[in-house]
Amino acid sequence: MTEIATVSSGLVAPRRILKPRRASYWRAVGRRLLRDRVTMVCLGILAVMALAMIFAPLLGLYDPLQGSMIRRLKPVGTPGHILGTDELGRDMLTRLIYGGRLSWFVGITPVAIAFVVGGALGITAGYAGGRINMAIMRITDVFYAFPSVLLAVAISGALGPGIGNAIIAMTMVFIPMMIRISESVTTSTRNLDYVEAARSTGASALTVVRVHVLPNVLGSIFVYATTLVSVSMILASGLSFIGLGVKPPEPEWGLMLNTLRTAIYTQPLLATLPGLGIFVTSLCFNMASDGLRAAMDVRA
Amino acid sequence: MLHIDQPEDRGGPAQPLVIARGLAKYFPLKRGLFGSGGAVKAVDGLDLEIKKGETLAIVGESGCGKSTVSRLLMGLIPPTAGEVLFDGELVGSAALPAKEYLRQVQMVFQDSYASLNPRLSIEESIAFPPMVHGLGRTEAVERAHDLLDAVGLAPGLFAGRYPHELSGGQRQRINIARALALRPRLIILDEPVSALDKSVEAQVLNLLMDLKEQFGLTYLFISHDLNVVHHVADRVLVMYLGRAAEIGPVESIFAAPGHPYTRGLLASRLSMDPTKRRKTPPLTGDPPNPVNPPPGCRFNTRCPIAEPVCSNSQPNLAAIGHTIHALGHEAACWALVPGSGHSLATRKVA
């Protein structure tokens, strides 16, 4: 009797496992991300930085623009100024947090715009193929002929200094990159059998792209865009460094790096701090996008 | 809802479901910026008839144009030349617009994984084609569940799952269900079972045969597996380098192949009987480059009975059958045409 009981329970159990379910793809990605410790640490660091920047006015910091001639270039660890003061006696911690706001803004905005514009153009080129592809991709090649930093400096220099112009210049640099990556993933997706099967039902191109192409290419395009964020932040800092981006006294990491450059022999640690901000942010964005790429590669 | 059910038979049973005339597809080769470097002649002047309710198999080596024929018939690529008539109506004409034609012709691909969108659940994949043709979501999902039932997968277990959670055989059943979702009259099966295990292959083939009966379908079955073809086909078309080498009823072709290429193909099947094993391969070499097909008969470079006439002019399909079973058996070979100048041709003067 016991044997029969086990057999019947053995027959019931699999049915419970095979219960109809809707295992969403994104939920699976989330689960894999949570298990990836490196990515979680990076996302954590980025989250802490983001929160500090958003709630900067509530943190009881100094005025980022208010200097003090008697408190110039205090070293790291000075009481009252944990991270010291800069060449005009402004609190470094305050300026790093407020500077991060601008650095992140000019780092992320161009990539976000390029993601939308470049992604749309690239998917169009990839799906349409033929002459449309030719037209879009050859124009892209023209932009590709210039080194990205040179192009950004040239456009930004032509438009004049300022945050808005720097963002426009960097967007112009990133759009061709986004077009190229989205064109190539779309081209390879469009020839897959399931896209052909969808086309062979007589569905319009727009429907096929919306239902079958977009969900399958957006992930890789998004991951590529997140890797560009770090490039963008470095580029933005570079533009500010040479005086084409943010103008003083506005705090921005690249600009701070430039103004503290002269103090590198007296206060080397202090001069490194803005660079460290750029470094940590870029590294975390890169590692997080790497982790995201791995987590999205769900096959089995 | 009415217009998404199987359309009525218009031409009657005697009207072939599909007539393709002079079908050709050249893929141009790009060589440099200026001037084209010729073209790959994937399909070159193919005439084809698919009768209502039959299974026509297309066999041939890889690269002979089998898959190009299926993609041409599916409207996935435009033909270089030729026209297709579906139930007597020219495809693309006012009487049969392309979208209406595509609804009546569906395809099952070889790669069961690549042919399912990984981001769509099973029921969404099957419900997509009817929704394209205006069926509401609820009805389309309902139909998807009915079709899952028809292909032997319990809707309660599979409807919400994703392709990567299923086995190859299950996925191919889903592809079949999706192909049925528009209630088509012709299904093109492009090597539907060649990626499956032998045991699963038999199950899927039997399912296909059952569904054909149940839904009143006509099949175009593309395969390189001659044993499978022998099992499922009513008629067989043997293709070589973009052209028809031989066509005829399956029994007649397998019992008395007329074209030397067909004989070679049949002899290259593996045998379970050790005494029937061959020491020398029946066919040697590769098919010639389809960019520059050889003059005359395309098979003459590899043909064991090639003679000068074979490289001079191209033979056309001609009836070779003399018995009632061989009705409609045609082959394109000079050795079968009396008076062609081929030394073997004389003995067959009718």
Image (cartoon, coloured by chain):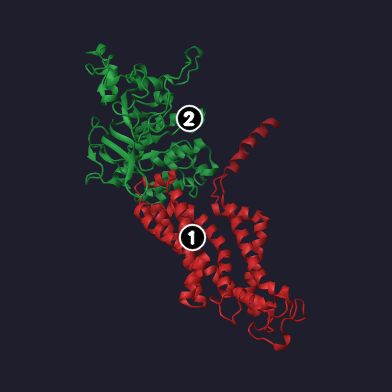
Chain colours: A red, B green
Specify whether A262 is left or right of A223: right
Q: Name the residue under label 2.
A: B201
Quadrant position of residue B74: top left
Left or right: A183, with B323 as reference point: right
Residue at x 67% of width, y 61% of height: A41
Q: What residue type is labelled 1?
A: Met
Image: A135 above or below B25: below
Q: What residue type is labelled 2?
A: Glu
Residue A67 locus on image (x, y percent): 67, 86
Q: Is mark 1 on a helix, strand or loop?
A: helix
**Subunit of label 1:** A
Q: Based on the displayed image, in which of its 4 quarters is residue B253 positioned?
A: top left
Of the pair B271 and A198, the residue shown nearer to us: B271
Looking at the image, is B7 positioned above or below residue A167?
above
Q: Residue at horizontal 67%, vertical 84%?
A: A88
The mark found on residue A177 in the picture is: 1
Residue A55 appears in the picture as rendered? no
Q: How many numbered marks are there?
A: 2
The x and y percentages for residue B97 are 26, 46
